[in-house]
Image (cartoon, coloured by chain):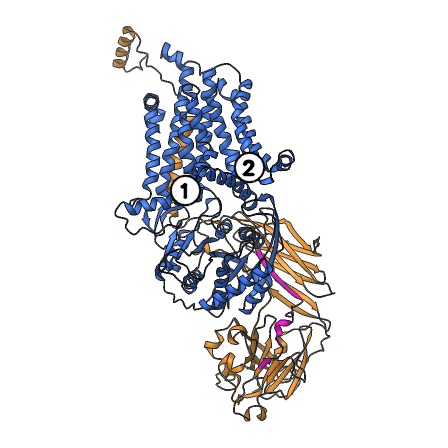
Chain colours: A orange, B blue
Amino acid sequence: MAAALPLVLLVLLLLGPVGRGHAEPPRDSLREELVITPLPSGDVAATFQFRTRWDSELQREEGLSVLLKADRLFHTSYHSQAVHIRPVCRNARCTSVSWELRQTLSVVFDAFVTGQGKKDWSLFRMFSRTLTEPCPLASESRVYVDITGYNQDNETLEVTPPPTTTYQDVILGARKTYAVYDLLDTAVINNSRNLNLQLKWKSPPESEAPPVPFLHAQRYVSGYGLQNGKLNTLLYNTHPHRAFPVLLLDTVPWHLRLYVHTLTITSKGKDNKPSYVHYQPAQDRLQPHLLEMLIQLPANSATKVSIQFERALLKWTEYTPDPNHGFYVSPSVISALVPSTVAAKPVDWEESPLFKSLYPVSDSSSYFVRLYTEPLLVNLPTPDFSMPYNVICLTCTVVAVCYGSFYNLLTRTFHIEEPSTGGLAKRLANLIRRARGVPPL
Amino acid sequence: MGLLSDPVRRRALARLVLRLNAPLCVLSYVAGIAWFLALAFPPLTQRTYMSENAMGSTMVEEQFAGGERARSFARDFAAHRRKTGALPVAWLERTMRSVGLEVYTQSFSRKLPFPDETRERYMVAGTNVYGILRAPRAASTESLVLTVPCGPDSTNSQAVGLLLALAAHFRGQIYWAKDIIFLVTEQDLLGTEAWLEAYHDTNVTGMQSSPLQGRAGAIQAALALELSSDVVTSLDVAVEGLNGQLPNLDLLNLFQTFCQKGGLLCTLQGKLQPQDWTSVDGPLQGLQTLLLMTLQQASGRPHGAHGLFLRYRVEALTIRGINSFRQYKYDLVAVGKALEGMFRKLNHLLERLHQSFFFYVLPALSRFVSIGLYMPAAGFLLLVLGLKALELWMQLHEAGAGPQEAGGASGPGPPLPPAQSVGLASLVAPLLISQAMGLALYVLPVLGQHVATQHFPVAEAEAVVLTLLAIYAAGLALPHSAHRVMSAQAPDRGWMALKLVALIYLALQLACVALTNFSLGFLLAATMVPAAALTHPCGPRPLYAALLVLTSPAATLLGCLFLWRELQEAPLSLAEGWQLFLAALAQGVLDHHTYGALLFPLLALGLYPCWLLFWNVLFWK
């Protein structure tokens, strides 16, 4: 997968109760946030989050929203929008409830294209806008920039303007440092009436290998021809010394008939026996195959899970309008508790930045990851739909006409039965018999 | 069918077939050949047209302007290549990464069954480098491939330069809906085969290769590029793939569209396109192209790196830049624009290319003959075999029923016991022996090469070819050995039954071959059918024997080589022809083992034993 997420822009807008324990929270608590992080591929990810109360006015033209300019956002490698609504207690006894609305927009900027081949970025280059003023409604409006690896000598990277405060936290098992720009802090914007954040890499990051996530996966179909094939899922554990279990969930449409006895799991060239397998066979046209496995991934290994299938012939009305495009097989879902390198502290959700909610933590020694592999496109044997009716009619006619005759010709021998005319007496007798209406001799 | 189940009419028909058999056979054969020759003429050739809606009009604006960049990439590549003596993998990786691709390498090695003398290789190892351009906002389910096969010498460096320049240009565009794989393979087709096998995670040919780290879903189409100079005068397009498979005609139409749009001079089989189809000159020129294509397709060899993609149902073709002595020259920008246009059009595809023809022959780029129109040519030729078989069948029956029919036509009579008994028992021996010869021809040359090199002063490749010829010739001694096995009863019926079986066997094989690879089926039918029909143990035996030898599969191959070079206007002398013949034999065996080409097993296991049966008939005692 090598999730090549460039720049994630996360704006979080929050209006609503700030603290659960507070007796009567301020009515308008809109929190907005923009997080900018580099990705392993060298691209830049930006995540906006806005959190607010359901009833507040969201059509705003100030604050972080000025950056949301459609033609730039859709010029990116990836974007994803999410809306979460949940009830929040207004007081400790939960006698009254507010609704919290959280909008998230994650965008991955292709740093290669926007940065002319370099990994440097600036707000203006990404969004063709700069920040001019904080949102007047917001109780909190912040920009976080991932500057992990930044030190005082400015050797690896340089952010301008230099951050006044930094924030440290453990994200996905690794310690991260963020430069924090509080837009409500008048010093941040007021100097030049606009804030154009920039990041420059001093030493070319190409020299070092891009950090690979501990768990990543890849999926593909192998084989050729329209009869058989094989589904393969590659699971990589790049942790140097820790093995951990993953839960692999596959749903495969019924028209790929899985041969479960061919399920093989190999790690480092050896058979890897799953500790738990749940298989629910498909029923034609009713339910797909469901295959769930708990697999232990050895440290620093690639595990290959493969299973063979046969492509079914569909009824001709069951084909999609574009049958030659192929049929999609949904991604495998991989869930795992990946060991952390750094212990995470317990979090107070209301006090910590909004983007923390994107990275759930179960306990201090590991963090939860759910990966979706790429979907697959599998071609099924497809009839020529340009003239099925003609073909069916013609074939049926030919078969019907030819089969019977050929069968006759091949299984019978024909001999000429010479009509024995007999003598004169017999002919006469027959004449008389015909006249009498009696069958002839 | 009623016609056949009515005994009276059936007998009349049978008499007609018996009496007019020879003229009917001649007529049918002549009709087959004439039909084939007429394929190049307008009523049978049709104008090509684009069937795929998604690629319909040429509404793309090509913006590629990286000619200078391509040339500098090519110069650097050639320089690094000279320095390292092999594919400069590190440089390629660095350069691909610098233009923004996701780069992976794959190393492979393969020990050929015997040394390849024309390319001077035996233990082959190499590294393929490929970069993937990920389409923005897409899930990597589909991809397109641009591949440049690099041989041992530093030709094709301009193609690598253009590939890199195109990659750099494509990287900046946002309209891609499919990933694009830029693939540079080493050891030309062997590298391509290794990469394809690894991509599809199969092993067809016993290649050892490292698994691929990066994939990009189902490959929808592929283009292979071969360029050896900075300027080209024309672009030649190759369509014939492994085992005579052809890409969908729409891909060729797409190429032609962009040739026309860019005003490029495009050739097929190295022949210019005739303009005037109303007079005789155009179609005659088309006929040459058609014959060249037939020979090329019949050989079953991939006519470029694209040929190996077809097995995986990836529509592909090879574009070759030719630099010859013509006035108008095009630089890399023109070629790059054509490629850019083609990729943008392929990017629009919603389904795999399937709308247009998969079975066709081409007398010109803009004309084609579809399967419905060319099959009658092969059908007429095979009809000869059918007529002959029918005649023999009836003669066999009549020979059995003769006394009864002559004596008195009344009564059903017992159903011909001698005819039944002659048939099968006596046929087993010659059939088995000739099949065993075929098996020996298939297995022994490669298996016994080491024995041969120990006992004779020859190299492995020579040993294989000479063993092949020796076994082939040894098969001619078969009648003498088979004769002893034969029972002496009913001598006449023996050969008739054998010839009947051989005719049906040949007709079946040729029909199957003609359906999948028309060119091969037609060529074999055109040469083998007359001799097969004429073979007869009585009459002028030496004449028949000479005819039979001249039309044996090996002689057909030799003849095709001469015809091929004649059509390419580079005629062969006899000695050259013989050398080329030996090389072609070795290549045929090698292609079978390295790419899985089926021509060699087909000839060795199918047609050669069948041909031996006719030889057996001829020398029947």
Report if residue A216 lies within the magenta region: yes
- Quadrant in which residue B114 is drawn: top right
In this figure, which residue is indicated by the disc labeled 1? B571
User: Is residue B370 visible to us here?
Assistant: no
Do callouts 2 and 1 mark residues in contact (Cβ within 8 Å)? no
Give the CA separation, mark 2 to mark 1. Answer: 24 Å
Q: Nearer the viewer, mark 2 or mark 1?
A: 1
Residue type, mark 1 in image: Pro
**Where residue B377 sits: x, y (%)?**
36, 37
The residue carrying pointer 1 sits among few (fewer than 14), some (14 to 19) or many (20 or more) residues within 10 Å by Cα, namely: some
Relative image position of residue A129 (x, y in whole percent): 49, 83
- Judging from the image, mark 1 belongs to the subunit labelled B
Residue type at tag 2: Val
Q: Which residues are magenta?
A: A199-220
Residue at position x 70%, y 66% in the image: A239
Closer to the chain start, of discs 2 and 1, is 2
Looking at the rendered structure, the secondary structure element under dot 2 is helix
